[in-house]
Amino acid sequence: MKTETKTPRVLVPRVDILESTAGLRLVADLPGTTDNDVELHLEKSALVLQARAPALGDAIWRRSFVLPRELDPESVKAHLADGVLTIDLPRKQEAQPRRIPVTFTG
Amino acid sequence: MFLAPYVSVPRPWSAWADLDKEFDRVFEGLSGTDTPTGWEVHETPEAWAFTVLVPGLNADQIRIDATLDTLSLSGRRAVPVTEGYKVIRQERGDLHFARTFQFPGPIDADHVQAELKSGVLRVTVPKRSAPQPRLIKVQTPTA
């Protein structure tokens, strides 16, 4: 009997990218995944999003993003609801726009 | 009665295979991805089984209607505008689908089951067995 090694199908999720003064927000459609299926990795300057989808014949959603330097990878927050993942990537403190108090002299 | 073959099987998963090529795309140079709504239909001797990808939709945003031999599925998702955010890239957008399936035989519309979980909708449509032809015995009244 022939044995087959089954490689999981890789699907590319659709993603919206939003920006605010606080940082970037990525919103990805990941139907078929739950919290335990989602992994976020940092590889050099890239954020790799990977999620198993047991509900879709064990397909894998996967996509990577090059992160701008001013983002703080240590404080990434993610939230998954109804198969939609929201990732918040805050800017580093020093990169956030600030109001500089100006003192005039003379 | 002539039964039309079941021709309305929609976009199969295989259409997604092309997406594999885009495996390692990064921020720059992204092109638009394929349809946000994947469909799959399976037939068993007892039922038709539909799988539809509907990320971001809740049960109230999906409508399913069944008749003697059709099933209609429709839904709508509006991506909300997030206050204080500027859109850099938009691939998801609003999602709207509406499709009617014509089955080659009668279905059991009273026992259609639908389940929504993590953005995946599964609908099971039991078939109704056609009445079997019966042999009618001819009576010869004796009187």
Image (tube, coloured by chain):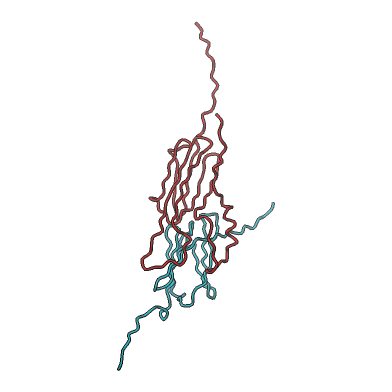
Chain colours: A cyan, B red
Q: Residue furthest bottom?
A: A106
**Given the current orientation, which residue lies at the most extreme right position?**
A1
Q: Nearer the viewer, residue A34 or B22?
A: B22
The one nearer the camera, A76 or A17, is A17
Q: Residue at x 51, y 58 (%)?
A: A53
Residue at horizontal 39 percent and vertical 73 percent from the top: A21
Question: What residue is shown at x 55% (from left), y 58% (from top)?
Answer: A59
In percent of the image, x 31 and y 90: which residue is there?
A104
The image shows residue A14 at horizontal and vertical percentages of 50, 61
Where is residue A74, by image quadrant? bottom left
In this view, B101 is above or below B31 = above
Q: For the image shown, how many numbered marks are present on the structure? A: 0
Q: Quadrant of the N terminus of chain B?
A: top right
Residue B42 image offset from top left, x and y in percent: 55, 45
Residue B125 position, x and y percent, is 48, 41
* Residue B10 pos. (x, y %): 54, 47
In front of the other: B48 or B3? B3
Point out the residue furthest to the front here: A106
Pick whichever, A102 or A53, lies toward us: A102
